Image (tube, coloured by chain):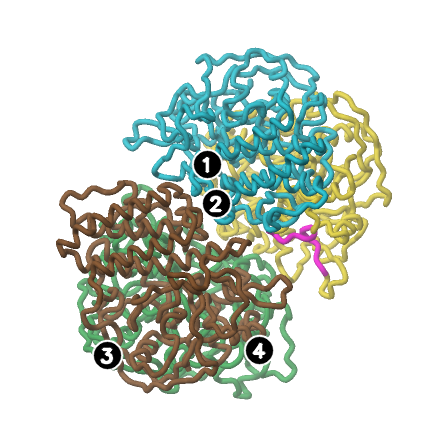
Chain colours: A yellow, B cyan, C brown, D green
Amino acid sequence: MPTLFNRWKATREYSVAIAALLSAEDAAAQSMPDASPIKWHLAHTTWFFETFILNSGESNFQPFNPVFRMLFNSYYNGIGEQYPRPQRGLLTRPGFQEILAYRHAVDLRMQSLFEAQTSEGLIELGIQHEQQHQELMLTDIKHLLSCNPLNPAMVGKDNQLGISDNVSTASTTMEWHSFEAGLREIGHHGTDFCFDNEMPRHKHYVEKFMLASRLVNNAEYLEFIQAGGYKNPALWLSNGWNWINQQQIHHPLYWRHSDDGDQWQEFTLHGLQQLDPSQPVCHLSYFEACAYASWVGARLPTEAEWEYAAQKMEHVSQLFDSCWQWCSSSYAPYPGYVTTEGAIGEYNGKFMVDQYVLRGSSAFTPRHHSRITYRNFFPTSARWQRTGIRLVK
Amino acid sequence: MPTLFNRWKATREYSVAIAALLSAEDAAAQSMPDASPIKWHLAHTTWFFETFILNSGESNFQPFNPVFRMLFNSYYNGIGEQYPRPQRGLLTRPGFQEILAYRHAVDLRMQSLFEAQTSEGLIELGIQHEQQHQELMLTDIKHLLSCNPLNPAMVGKDNQLGISDNVSTASTTMEWHSFEAGLREIGHHGTDFCFDNEMPRHKHYVEKFMLASRLVNNAEYLEFIQAGGYKNPALWLSNGWNWINQQQIHHPLYWRHSDDGDQWQEFTLHGLQQLDPSQPVCHLSYFEACAYASWVGARLPTEAEWEYAAQKMEHVSQLFDSCWQWCSSSYAPYPGYVTTEGAIGEYNGKFMVDQYVLRGSSAFTPRHHSRITYRNFFPTSARWQRTGIRLVK
Amino acid sequence: MPTLFNRWKATREYSVAIAALLSAEDAAAQSMPDASPIKWHLAHTTWFFETFILNSGESNFQPFNPVFRMLFNSYYNGIGEQYPRPQRGLLTRPGFQEILAYRHAVDLRMQSLFEAQTSEGLIELGIQHEQQHQELMLTDIKHLLSCNPLNPAMVGKDNQLGISDNVSTASTTMEWHSFEAGLREIGHHGTDFCFDNEMPRHKHYVEKFMLASRLVNNAEYLEFIQAGGYKNPALWLSNGWNWINQQQIHHPLYWRHSDDGDQWQEFTLHGLQQLDPSQPVCHLSYFEACAYASWVGARLPTEAEWEYAAQKMEHVSQLFDSCWQWCSSSYAPYPGYVTTEGAIGEYNGKFMVDQYVLRGSSAFTPRHHSRITYRNFFPTSARWQRTGIRLVK
Amino acid sequence: MPTLFNRWKATREYSVAIAALLSAEDAAAQSMPDASPIKWHLAHTTWFFETFILNSGESNFQPFNPVFRMLFNSYYNGIGEQYPRPQRGLLTRPGFQEILAYRHAVDLRMQSLFEAQTSEGLIELGIQHEQQHQELMLTDIKHLLSCNPLNPAMVGKDNQLGISDNVSTASTTMEWHSFEAGLREIGHHGTDFCFDNEMPRHKHYVEKFMLASRLVNNAEYLEFIQAGGYKNPALWLSNGWNWINQQQIHHPLYWRHSDDGDQWQEFTLHGLQQLDPSQPVCHLSYFEACAYASWVGARLPTEAEWEYAAQKMEHVSQLFDSCWQWCSSSYAPYPGYVTTEGAIGEYNGKFMVDQYVLRGSSAFTPRHHSRITYRNFFPTSARWQRTGIRLVK
């Protein structure tokens, strides 16, 4: 296992390596309030180390630029004001090169702290935090490029970083694995890193259930569309029905009709491609996932079901590295959850409302940044993440 | 126990008795999209009997007025189109008297069906449905009258129907009742009526907890305000903090500063009153309930905790007849929940997303329309219902 | 000529006579922010006399109800705060009968002032003001009833008040009357009443032009629709094209397809009727009027052209009593225009921006409330007034 | 006088010279829907030559890139679809360098056409069009940089292009020049270039008036603020009063309070500066210009007054090169105005509604791009242009 320093260094380098695939203009634009410019991610992850580690770890701390404290604060009210999120794309200054200089300066100062071997817990958090933003960088740039009628590709299929929208596909037959009812334990235990929202480990009574052996794929979802799934209110949650009608949603986020209307295509980080029927269906809202499940007479898993099944490891494929899997569980604190003191306590706890849990990890998740207790979360209408469907009966 | 017919008759009469306290104008206005005109409630509850019982129960069914099928359909896509909800206040026709005539005609036809003793389940559902709307009538008219600078009273304090905003108050000291951890059962069992969302009864593991002996009262909530509770982001969920700032919310929905600014007043169905410190604080959003709980180092109960405590009946006051109590549980189907076939299946199931559960009942709930398995639900920002705070530690 | 008192009395009675054709519910609802409840018009016109005449004319003035000063103030900042315009439909109190009592009380007090023969100018203004609101009462109730799928009629075609949507039609052939170029005078002169915006009379150089002998009728406008007029951007002002696409506008406000889609119908104060091809096309926005004119190679008149043509009276029909006629002139002060001192100065002057002038009068205008110098004005997208098209070449 | 070719070449070079002062990121961002990225201006002005000249002038026309026809079409429906205006900042591709290549390629092809001496009128229009966009480039980049808390300067005060926010100031005393009443002629005559909206020359009767010798300056406008001008509804048009209250507007667009609150500063292309009392007040809406005029007992000029005064040249300063001057005239076609055939006819005519005329030119207007008949136009709430106040009595 690499040392903390080595992992920190590799993480810092990987963010820059992603950005290096883009022009300064690509890295500066913001396609919607939910997304952020790549450049902003580079700066914010640096701000995180500067604010939560250097600021307390250095005896004579001086900020790199006092205005950055506000510009690159995402949502920590405990730190102070924030530049309005929907306007991050207006920050043409500092420029890309200046942000690299900011990264470099903070990295040098971090290296001195490593020698003092303090703040290891916070450094680990800073690494994990940057890894989360690496996934966001890919989802955000995908969304940005998808808005461009030129359909630009970010990367070729065999790029050195291994960035890809295509995942290993599963056997074509969907099978159902049975799990017995019983009192189960979920949540993190042990001393490895986890986020606070994965703790404490606790008991949960789970009824018997059957879990699908793989994710729903494009071919299956296309059947749903062709059967009029988006036009049948009986399949939809009320909020979902209103939402697809107001937003005029008829298919997954990145699906496109070909110009002649006969073919389906999908926008990917490799540009526009023919829709691959065997790939898992992806970039779906919670509402669409529920409607599909309803159509096939199944449902989404609770997060306890998902985690218990993952514990048992019974030949269920595509749990990780493919698509995040919507759960029917609203994102809530585990029994006995305690928020960390101070501004860092805002990391997870204050978002535990009006969102749903996603489990697993996706093709965009950095390696080693996933585990069976991991809890991702998004609002019901979010679609720009790699979100897919695991069924349960 | 009264017969089904007697209960049906009493329910039908009570709705009209509420409306009789209002002018035709009061009964026609709609103060916001969430609320409906009183007149519309009178018609919709009648439409429910006509559509779900007469339509199948009568051999030669003829609608009272074919346009009403659309005008008074709330949200049943299985029945057909609906008149846009936010515009219900524009339906000056049919007038109040015409709607009474509609009620009378449907009631006469219902009486014939009673003799045939069919559809008892649906009739029971129609009664319960109308009782739910009776509570909405009081909350909706309260909201409407609150928009009027004349601060009109709907009723005097000793009105014959016993309609009141004032509830019996509890002992001043808040005590904490302990409950042991264990695997519990919640949900409805037996043959009495319940809504489909209360079933099936199922197991839930509950950690040990302490429940407050009474609801939080106005005096306590005022302390929270005076201590700057609405200005401290550390107490709030992120969505809540954004919401109170965007909506400029600084106090419970119906609280008002007196003209000289020295006193707090509260708008009630009896008009504007001095704020009574011993009354339970009421008309709060989920966000405010959570922020208050956070401030006192407590939290909201899960619905399993609430229901288990109610089963034990350990001298906990104000469970019913005072304020609905926000739970930290998102509104979701119980394990094994099955939606009813047909349009009636839209009654509850399609709303099981993006809402939170409230337990108990309120001063506006009709008598005999409450039980410990009852699940009410509203979005996090809803405040016009009688919603209050039960704490847990 | 009737005395001032007689005209005042007749005007006051006519407003009540209009309202008497409606239920209390009809009179209380507000269908959109631009429109007001009939009941509010009754109260506001009374407020006008109370505020601008009784308040200064009575030595011991006491308001009928001090809250009414705010409730029924339309837009006079000089008088004080106003109840929010979009919420006028929420004022179920004071009720219809109470507002009639308000009218009666103010009328009695006004009669005493008549004997003192003071404030004649302001009384005349109050009469004219109430007549303007009488027209608004008819346009506002028409809009409200049009929102009701029951298509209710306000009045029969032979009602005693002579209220009608149908106007005397003109000869079928449209002719063009020529007017020479020259320096003309427009604006009010003499001692008869006029609004301040009609003064002062001033010179205007008018190029030669030809004016259409009658208004554009439904048959002609239908040709425009059938020729794809609403789908051809070349015919539209840029703002108009955006507006019809955003609002999904394809025909005049009150036109409807019959259920079988083969026929055009029009909603009127007499309910839903077959579209009468010979009636002038009505309830059009400025944008639609311009697009139609562009399609036939004509244009809208300037207000100077319209007024000069009206001075010459050369057999041009439908100048009055049919539809207001959109002019290409933006609503602006005449050279030398002076605003009246005090709150009454807010009557016209502060609206002289972002609106266009309409000339003539309509079928809803009270008798004797029109003249050739009269300047009506609405924003470009307003359609609920009786607005039509007079062409110029 | 330089040849058409030389002027064309100089104009093309000047656009690139402006952009060369910015980073690729600066050139790509869009700060609001009204503004466009600098890069987009560079591409659109090139698109104009490609679409309106090369396309018909070249016998074997091939587009540089067929998608550009849509991407860089501003508003010409006659040419086809347009990329949504508010999303221009999302077009990170084509990048800055690629757009320079586009410019270069089109310029080479244009040079061949020059030798054929065709399309001179359209080439002249293309030059004038690009000059208009050069002014927009400066106003748009100023707005973008103003959104950045780092307060970046675009240029130093002595930059080689002479770009500046500071104008030559006038004598401190404001004087009034009298003009007699009479029938005047305004509008373009002769054979020099003008836009179609400046024609035809026509007669206008102008009453006598007095024109201020200079623009209102910052010191004078500050008095208006300090006297409570933004809090007194009597000074404002009704729409203006609503607008400043909804938008929370209390001062000109780029004015800022210093951090200690004691000083006024102004954001400029040179960064944040102390407010210079002698500079003309700038970046005002029509509403603010009217309110100020009302406060001093004056008014804004009509465009006929302004143009007639400019014809007389009576020692009135700051007519040009300082701030555009709001006129009270709504933007409308001159009598006899004829729209050009084809898509180029969309250049001006379709915007002649709901906007007001501005006369003169500003410090951002390219040299030789102004004349006394020039008609600029913006909606009443526009503030990001250099707009100021010339008074009339």
Marks 4 and 2 in Cβ contact (< 8 Å): no
Report the amino acid beneath label 3.
Lys
The span from disc 3 to disc 1 (Cα, nearest Å) is: 69 Å
Distance between the alpha carbons at the discs numbered 4 and 3: 44 Å
Q: Are marks 2 and 3 in contact (CB under 8 Å)?
A: no
x, y percentage for residue A380?
63, 41
Task: Give the foreground label among 2 and 1.
Answer: 1
Type of the residue with mark 4: Leu
Distance between the alpha carbons at the discs numbered 1 and 4:
74 Å
Mark 1 vs mark 4, foreground winner is 1
x 86%, y 45%: residue: A172
The magenta stretch spans residue A256: yes
Give the residue at mark 4: D108
- Residue B141: mark: 1
Quarter where residue C169 is shown? bottom left
- Residue B36: x, y in percent? 51, 41
Three-letter amino acid code of the residue under disc 1? Ile
Instruction: Read off the chain for label 2.
Output: A
Q: Which residue is mark 3?
A: D312
Image depth: mark 3 or mark 1 in front: 1
